[in-house]
Amino acid sequence: MEPQAIHDAVKAKFGDAIVELQAEGFRPPFVVVAPERIADVALYLRDDPAMLFDALMCLSGVDYKDRFAVAYHLYSMTHRHTVGLKVFLPRENPAVASVDAVWPAANFMEREAFDLFGIDFPGSKDLRRILLPEDWDGHPLRKDYKYPEFYHGIKV
Amino acid sequence: MTTPAEALPTQEMLINMGPQHPSTHGVLRVLLRTDGEVVVNAKPDVGYLHRALEKIGERVTYAQFMPFTDRLDYLASMNCNCAWAWAVEKLAGIEVPERAEYIRVIVAELNRISSHLIAFGSFTADMGAFTPFLYSIRERERVNDLFEEICGNRLTYNFARIGGVSADLPQGFLEKTKEFLDYFEPKIPEYNNLISYNKIFLHRLANVAVVTAEEAVAYGLTGPNLRGSGVAFDLRRDEPYSVYPKLEFNVCVGTGERGQVGDCFDRYMVRINEMRESVKILRQAIAQIPEGPVLAKVPRLFKPPAGEVYFRSECPRGETGFYVISDGTVNPYRLKIRTGSFVTMNVFEKVTKGLMIADIVAVIGSFDIILPEIDR
């Protein structure tokens, strides 16, 4: 299925929870979903016989300066089609439901987004920092991140 | 075999395996909770080698990021170089000369062979057979010599460029590659005679850490680890890029020939068989390579149009994907690198439940992880 058709199908199913299709300049295009419905949309895309997106290729956090986003790149091993999902989150306390119950592959990638962007994934089975030390201050991939001058009293 | 658990009460013990442990192929720390020799739970702890490559990517230009991709997976720098170039070319819509694409495929497949050789050699060394390691290093040395001829480096090549490759092949390179292939192809059965079907080796690998096809897809395994579980999926064939559609090769999958489909032995065998397929690809590429330029005209001040692209390619350790967001300036706005090893570590805790401590070494080796790619 083409991303436009996938967008139309989920739009028919979820109505207002589907905000728009980002198509121009986006490869693959993104279906923008309201953050509170992401788990339902994810489950639908995985299990519907016409969709069967059984593989989560990539989950990334993005800082768009005025807001955060989480981008999901999906692939179907059966139908060999691909689409992106995106949720936009506010700058204050960004949080979106975890999808690791839908795609177990999400766990490490969500931990990475939590670690480097400070995006919370409520419902995750195990959400800890993954790449940085547990006592690290701040989230380095945020655009307003200030480089620390000291780490444990050592000048960096 | 039953353990008389009631008669001999045991205590759970917490053991740190790594971060400095020879079998972890780098600085991986695994927190083992064991009951005697049996692993109750093994939690991987990664990040010791984090160099903030994604943050660096936001501060350098597209071309300047090329040498950093060398350090993503240092055993397969050529593949990572090309993956980055392909991603940026897709973002900017650059047409690459055909000769450059053939050169990329040739170096990528040579690098795949050398990377699989290290996987094979270090894996057997971990399993207690040191001799095959020397054989694999001997053959890899010849690939390194070839790479030294084309770019001067033996480990981090920095060979691809956005729009092509940095230099044309030196004179006589294709003949030397052919000589290497003629020399190398008969070595693969030799490896099999030497170690693959060795009884002790088989006992260590067959039926250990089975990943079913459904699990492999759900956990996002890619590359040889996915194919080891019997899923015939290869980006070179199923999401073709570059000149791969013009080349014929088989997608090797695990068959469960000595145990169950998706055990350590299947993953090992997929890599051995893939070296043969790479030889096949190389022979065709050498026969087909056209004359012509090797670098497209790309402006020195390179600004791709604003947009977002996800490009993935088949690297020796699975899918390496670049999610690049451009805002129309000289450096990427956001650069996310998805690597095969990082996602593979996610399934580690699940498959190691109930194994023996020595099996952990087999599992790490069979997944063929590399730490710089996990920690980035």
Image (cartoon, coloured by chain):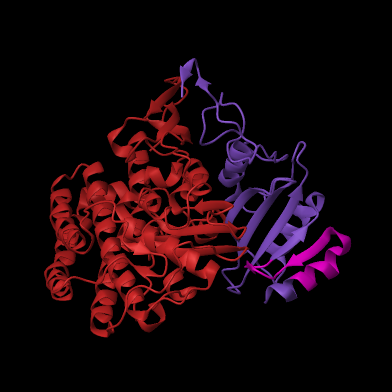
Chain colours: A purple, B red
- Give the x, y percent position of residue B136: 17, 55
- Viewer-proximal residue among B162 and B50: B162
| Residue with the most extreme right position | A16
The question of residue B6 being in magenta is answered with no
Magenta segment boundaries in residue numbering? A7-29
With respect to residue B66, does B108 lie above or below?
A: below
Residue B258 in sight here: no
Q: Is residue B298 left or right of residue A104?
A: left
- Give the x, y percent position of residue A23: 70, 70
Q: Residue at x 46, y 36 (%)?
A: B47
Q: Is residue B95 left or right of residue A126?
A: left
In terms of image quadrants, where is residue A145? top right
- Give the x, y percent position of residue B72: 39, 49
- Give the x, y percent position of residue A57: 56, 58
Q: Is residue B305 left or right of residue B366?
A: right
Q: Quadrant of the C terminus of chain B?
A: top left
Q: Residue at x 22, y 71 (%)?
A: B169
Residue B362 in sight here: yes
The question of residue A17 being in magenta is answered with yes
Q: Is residue A115 left or right of residue B70?
A: right
Q: Quadrant of the N terminus of chain B?
A: top left
Q: Residue at x 57, y 33 (%)?
A: A129
With respect to residue A51, does A56 lie above or below?
A: above
* Number of numbered discs on residues: 0
In terms of image quadrants, where is residue B32? top left
Q: Residue at x 62, y 60 (%)?
A: A73
In terms of image quadrants, where is residue B25? top left
